Amino acid sequence: MIAQVAAPSVYWTAIGPELAMGIGAALVLLLDVQFKPATKVLGRFVFFVLLVALGLTFAQHLAVDDIMARGTGDPAFLERFVPFSGMIVLDRAAVFARFVIVVVTALGVASGWKLFESLGRRAAETLALILLAATGFSLMAASLHLVMMFLGLEIGSIALYVLAGVTRERADSDEAAIKYFLLGSVASAVFIYGVSLVYAGTGQLGLGDVRGYLAGVVLTKPAVVLIGMMLITVGLAFKVSAAPFHSWAPDVYQGAPAGIVGFMASVAKVGGFAALIRVLLTAFPQFTDDWKPIIAGLAAVSMVVGAVVAVVQDDVRRMLAYSGVAHAGFILTGLMAGAAGASVIWFYLAVYTVQLVGAFGVVAAVSGAAGSRSDISAFAGLARRSPHLAVTFAVLLVGMSGLPVTSGFIAKFGVFQVAWIAGYQWLVIVALLASVVAFFFYLRVIVRMFMDDGESVELETPPLSIRSVLVGTALFTILVGVLPGPLLDLAREIIPI
Amino acid sequence: MTQYLWLIIALPLAGALFLHFFGRRVGEPRAGWLATFAIGGSFAVALAAAVPFFTGEAIHGEHLTLWDWMPAVGATLEIQWDALSALMTLVVTGVGTLIHVFAIGYMHGDPRFSRFFTYLNLFAASMLVLVLAGNFAMLFMGWELVGLCSFLLISFWQHKPSAAAAGKKAFVVNRIGDIGFVIALMLIFANFGTLSFEGVFERAAEVLSGPEAVAIGLLLLVGAAGKSAQVPLYVWLPDAMEGPTPVSALIHAATMVTAGVYLVSRSAAIFELAPAAGMTVATVGAITALWAASIAIAQTDIKRVLAYSTISQLGYMFLAAGLGGYVAAIFHLMTHAFFKALLFLGSGSVIHGMHEEQDMRRMGGLLKKMPVTAATMAVGTLAIAGFPGLAGFWSKDEILGVAFERGGFATVLWIAGLLTAMITAFYMTRQFVLVFLGKPRWSEGVEPHESPRVMTIPLVVLAALSVVGGLVNTPIRFGLEHFLEPAFEGIKLAHPPEGWLMFAILAGLSVLAGLAGIAIGYLVYSRPQEQWERFEGGFGKLWGLWERAYDVDDVYGKTIVSPGRKVAEVAAFKVDLPIIDGAVNGVGKAVALVGESTRRIQTGFVRSYGVLFVSGLVVVVIWILTVGA
Amino acid sequence: MVEGILFVVLAATSLGGAMTVVMARNPIHAAMGLLGTLFSLAVIYIINLAHLVAAVQIIVYAGAVMTLFLFVIMMIGVDKTEDTSETIPRQRLFIGILGLALLALGGALAIGDRFAWTPGTVRTEPVEGTIEILADRLFTEWLLPFESTALLLTIAAAGAIALAFFSRDGRVEK
Amino acid sequence: MLTWLVLSPLLAALVVAFLPTRRRELVLPVGILLSVVPLTLAGVVFYEFETAEAGFQFVQQAGWYRPWGIAWHLGVDGISLGLVALTTVLIPISLAASTKIERRLKEFVIFVLVLEAGVLGTFLALDLFLFFVFFEVILIPMYFIIGIWGSERRVYAALKFFLYTAFGSALMLGAIIALAIAHARQVGFLTFAYPDLLNVELTQTAGRWMFAAFALAFSIKVPLFPLHTWLPDAHVEAPTAGSVLLAGVLLKLGTYGLLRFNLTLFPQAAVDAVPIMATIAVVGVVYGAVVAIVQPDLKKLVAYSSVSHLGFIVLGTFALTSAGLQGAVIQNINHGLTTGALFLLVGMIYERRHTKKISDFGGLAKPMPIFAGLFLFATFASIGLPALAGFVGEFLVLIGSFPTLPVHAVIATSGVVLAAIYLLWAYERVFTGVPDREENKVLKDLGARELGLMAPLVILIFLLGLYPNILLDRTSASTEAILDRIEASSDFEVPAAGRLAGLFVAGDEGAGE
Amino acid sequence: MTVTAGWYMTLGAALFSIGLIGILVRRNALIMFMCVELMLNAVNLSFVAGGRAWGSIQGQVSVFFVLVVAAAEVVVGLAIIVAIFRKRTSANVDLLAELKG
């Protein structure tokens, strides 16, 4: 006897961008096998795919508006709002995350252009993996289900492990890949073990269901759930490189190919934070008082360690990695505000990831797309050798440091503000002091670029794609810094369910 | 006439400005004449404006408000024109004009001839601001501006390091006195809410308590002591002789140094309420008079003798003013202006004739070579020595009379004054004899000659004034007193004892003292050099002490300047750099150090990363189980 | 009672296997230990009526995955026994502390009786995990995760090529 | 109007940026010419300013991001007016003083113009968020100006300047957020508008903490002892224009902030903090002066003199009397002019001799009489000679501080003497005597361009010294309003002598005639 | 003595801990990787046990996905190890410590 399986209805819009990118990845591989096209062609195709994904994301944006406008009264509400039996959710956060991921991916592909050309035949796999990683993290950001979240996490992460080691000819790349892989696997295992504990403790896997269960009972001994929650948090904290779970980041940022490190770091952060917000705010609001101090502690440690250790780095990429740790701390600070923090976190993520990709674009242009060492001395006198690179890098660094008239300042300000309201004044003060320390290492690079004459090696002009990435990210940084309204409004609508 | 009063200040100021920008083009000697006309013009205006005071038409002062300056402290730029300021103006502009004329000759050939007259005019303007001010703030402005001009003129020969240092010293010491002045102003403002003379003096009696008045009075004394070179702030004045001689005459004899006396007299209303402060002023004055006179005895530099003599005479003025004898003080101020200007210009003429020689031991026998100078100097010497009938006699006598009349402690002051009178007569005679009489002791190649007319005429005029200047306020005709009385409305003025007998006794005593001094001086110094040198040696170490001015500069150097310097060095190089800046840089270094040690956790071994990760995990889990739930 | 005895036995074997993985000097031994654990767990799954899971555990894990492991072990060299002395300073110390902390944590939880985490509704009878039930879930409720695994497999394939595609002479394919 | 005032330097920077690279000689003239635009605008504002009006004028407001309550909100009152004017005056001068800059001239001009925009924005901002934005933005161009065009240890100095001041302002940002949130909790809506935030009622603790955070930021900027050590380094290393702007304008941000924000936003805390702040200020007055005496480097000497002089401003600020506040306001301007002039002059001699060490000079009055004269002028202006600008400020501060802070005021007077000592001693060593070094004998005196640079400063120093009312008229209403506010919202009563309503009115009448 | 889900959960926790410690102890990448597999197996056990406690099938479904992920990880992980081994003829991760600080 064969049981009849009822075909479920599928709301395609909800996974439009993922479909586009997933199919795109498959097509890249197939095209490569079939036609062996030039890398340039493949790259353009990827851009096309991303353009489609962007369009579909926009469609999702409209759809969310529509869903919200119709409200719960709509008979199809659940089917459209939490499609696929509640595995994912089509809310503003998910759409915003996709916007960020798609854009960051496009920027990453553009700044990795030289890398792909140097990879020869492996370019196709690399491009496909980039698309797949993006797909995974955007699924992760949209998921409303712990196992779905794990799958998205793994799709993205495994693709990133490979990308870290894609330039095999260099030892650093191997080292980065194995370190990333081993630690990443442990973190994933910790995450999914946490999921299993939560499941064991509540009998639920859907985030909303977990919350529903916890809201309905009074647990006197919630040890298993609490441990599970914390393990999930740790797994995600690893992904966003929050201290003390950050040790992989500097090595991977340094060892992985410069062209795509920015992309790798950015999408992992977006996916990780999206999941973290969802897990903590959607599934465990009951335990807010329990996790808040811990997140605050992680945030403080991240900011301090990131800033202080970045001060003594001589390699720009390691410096950016540690600054990324500090940034993770800043973003976590926003979580102190609970639901009110979600929008500022998303704003922060949007501006920071764009800056990060742009900054690594510069690093790639200066130290070579496949290169792994980018000692700060390589930047000496950059202002004279390549003023445009220097200026854009300076803008991006200033943006990351959070000085006014850049998007970074608005982002930090927003985070601090909500955290202060939430009563975490001490954390804000730590954050402020950490950002002062952070000024030092950003300025140090600027010093070398502008105030040091350095060797007079002429740089070859970076290709158009990288140049447009740099100009775009720098302009974005300033534009959002001056007129943050539209982006803030977009992020402000994000309210965790 | 009131509306033209501003011209008094404006004329020399305009002269200064014009000469500043175009002086070089105007050239010598026209620049000098221009400056002279500027100040002469303001003398004329002042004279015209002062007519009502002479005639007795105007009794009260008049005001001319120029414009608001600092309304928050009630300070406007205003001219107060009363008898006191009128008299001061006349002295300043009158003597000033003569000195200008003299300087045309004296500064002949100096490459910065026009610049010199710029400064002279500027000085005149500043001094006029001081005496014409209608409030303390503006007075302070003039006060400081004359300090500036004094600085500029003392260090006029900038290439001489000693001149530059002397200028700086003058300004700084004056500034130290200014601390007192400024604090006094603060007190005044805090009590009255204004700094205008009117507002302060009219309400002084009702507002000030005794101690407050004493405090203000003493603080004003500090300021006045700085400017008028009283003990202990007189040290700048002898050094100020580094400037060109007309400067010494104008600033350091006739005008600027009297500003302190003027200030005390102007603030009579406050000292009236503070007898203790007044007595302090008088005591300081007496001490200064004696102290400086004793130093003057042993000086060999022709100008230094005069410098210490000036300090001494200023002491007289303080003595009088402190005891309430404001008229006597101002009277002496005026006569002193005449004869001291005369003496300085005379000495300038000598120096000029002796090719910049200032050491009296290398002079002698100049009477024949410089008859006019010698004659006028003789008049000046007699006047300052208190020779009966001459200007100094009348004014000094009045001061001593005031002191005697007060009695009590003031009697001690009177004795000091009398002693000073004798010493003064002695050292002035010594000076005259050493310079003009006896045999020439000139250095080789020196050809003394009489100065040109442009220099001698002012001498003659001043000599004439030194003779007759005292007659304005003889006991027979208290002209000056009547003239000044309106300015001291409501103030009890101190007078010498009444009656001819007392006058005769007191005058007799002082004349006796003066004549004794003259006699000793003449008898000692008209003999050959070996003999007066033996006389000087007879004083033993004391003479050397006088010669070195009691080593006060050294003492100040050792007790204030060097320790101050050391403090500054310690602050700058032992505190500021290593400690304060070190702390700042230390924070930076500490951050880097923490960073360096923290980065060691990042060993590069993936397994130690694992340990870190698991540690974090365990901590977090334990935390949530213990703290969390 | 039977379940109790089985549990003890299986727990012993699985933990023994796990310890072997951690302690064995020779990778082959470690692999065998892992295999032991996998089999023990498969039996536990059967006890818990998770039939399909047990089957998949044997077929996929013990079968395919372990084969892959062994293959790589062969490639790297079987005969190499590892030097297990520690080279990273203080690594052992930290591990010891961490191990003790974990033990203490478990002990504390046990003493505090905090393993009884579920409210009164705990059932002891397991749900039967038949192919039908699981398939029904996989193709309806879990459709999206199920399809997403396609992406994982694609990544695995593409990643393996990207990482391990060497040309004959051992040099990197350009 | 004010918007254009802030934007015009930015537009000018844009124009300069797009000048053709080949026409290098155009950069500086165009920059100077364009910097006259803000000067003109500021002049118009100054002229049209209503003197009797205490509130903000020329207010412009536009929402920036309403949900956060931040806005583009500009306005000028008596306290900021003078500083705005000073800034616009100093910028063209410092640009024109930069003819000797060879490298990256264009960037230099751009940075100076951006700096101007930032400074103007800081002075004009009425929204605390906007204020902070401008306050921080200034760091960037100044950082580059010191770091690129400075002398040997420029990088060290630039970093120190940046980090030190950024450290202070970081905590201030926290306080700004806290204040806005306190307002939101009390009044119900989030805003950073300064006029709205005045209505916040703070607990004693909160008020003190916020006061401390603001005060720290501004004290570092001023800089007050013992937070001053970045200043000598920055000054010594900065190029002439940098030093002029640093001393003339940037330091004023600190004193301005204390006056504008610390006194009014936290009146009670400010009153409570008077002993501390005044003591620090006075210690700075004496300490800066003492340390200045033995400095071997001219620029360092002037830098420490700034520490001393700015102590006066802070003393006047916290004297909480009419005269004290007016003195503080006008001393801001005076110090900008006189120290600006001193730095210009040091820059001129540095261009000739490439050294700033006092011991390398001597007897310069002989070859360079005009220069010596101007230096002496600036020296005396700095010493506080009456009839020059410096006096009015110092005198008002001293006289004004006495009623409330007698001991402090008395000690501060010693700063006046010390100023004479260190500056005149420096003058003596540099200019007097006979030039003993060959290279000193052949120095050229100032040319027409350099005289032209100094002329406006000299004129302004005289003007403010003799007729300070041109400024005081415009400030008095605002300073009185500050005192009103402090009296209304704290337990402090300005003593009779410190609050001269009567005289103030009389002064007004005088002005009306 | 009734065996409850808790027993299995405890066993899972023990296995997970052993795996976790194993990662830290071993330096052979391959064995570290086996430890990861051990941890994932512990997860699976927890899922099954949890499902038993709640009478829910979801746990067993989840095990499938963990399995798939494990398989994919194995492929990629072994590829990385192989790639490294090719160049260094060693799977000792302690030799890979160039990036640090």
Image: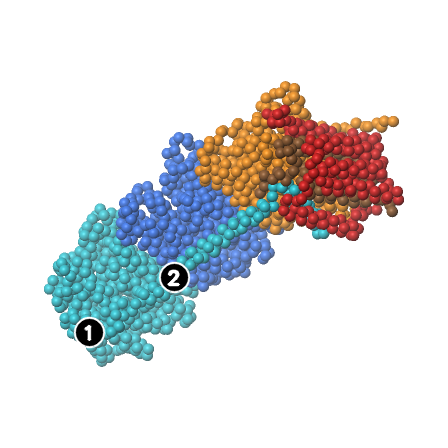
Q: Which chain is cyan?
A: B
**Residue B266's quadrant in the figure?**
bottom left
Question: Three-letter amino acid code at disc 2?
Answer: Gly
Q: Secondary structure at mark 1?
A: helix
Chain of the residue that carries numbered disc 2 in the rendered image: B
Q: Which residue is mark 2?
A: B564
At a point 59% along the width and 30% down the height, the residue shown is A169
In the displayed structure image, the side of residue B396 where residue C22 appears, left or right: right
Name the colour assigned to chain C in the rendering.
red
Going by the picture, which residue comes out furthest to the left? B368
Residue B82 visible in the picture:
no
Relative image position of residue B85 (x, y in whole percent): 29, 63
Q: Position of residue B357 (x, y in %)?
A: 19, 60
- Pointer 1 and pointer 2 on the same chain: yes
Per the rendering, the colour in which chain D appears is blue
Q: Please, which chain is the residue tagged with disc 1 on?
A: B
Look at chain A in the picture and name its colour: orange
